[in-house]
Amino acid sequence: MTFSSLIALFGAMFLLAIIPGPAVFAIIARSFRPGSCEGYI
């Protein structure tokens, strides 16, 4: 594996790690409606 491909792999993994998935969006949407305590249930 070359250094440039290693950097590209690290960049792609970093982007995938910081982008929240659909479950996080569902919890945030549920928290906005009734209040922050309801998002955890």
Image (tube, rainbow, N blue to C red):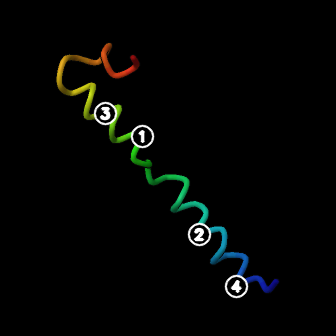
Dot 4 crowding, Cα within 10 Å, few <14, some 14–19, many 20+: few
- Give the vertical position of 2 relative to 17 (above or below): below
Q: Nearer the viewer, residue 40 or 5?
A: 40
- Give the vertical position of 31 relative to 11 (above or below): above
What residue is pinned by disc 2? 11
What residue is pinned by disc 1? 23
Q: Where is residue 35 in the image (x, y as percent from the top left)?
A: 22, 17
Instruction: Report the residue that reaches farthest toward the right.
Output: 1
Instruction: Report the residue that reaches farthest toward the left.
Output: 33
What residue is drawn where x is 51% and y is 62%?
Answer: 15
Dot 2 crowding, Cα within 10 Å, few <14, some 14–19, many 20+: few
Q: Type of residue at label 3?
A: Ile
What residue is pinned by disc 4? 4
What residue is pinned by disc 3? 28
Sequence order check, earlier mark of 2 and 3: 2
Sequence order check, earlier mark of 2 and 1: 2
Structural distance between the alpha carbons of marks 2 and 3: 26 Å
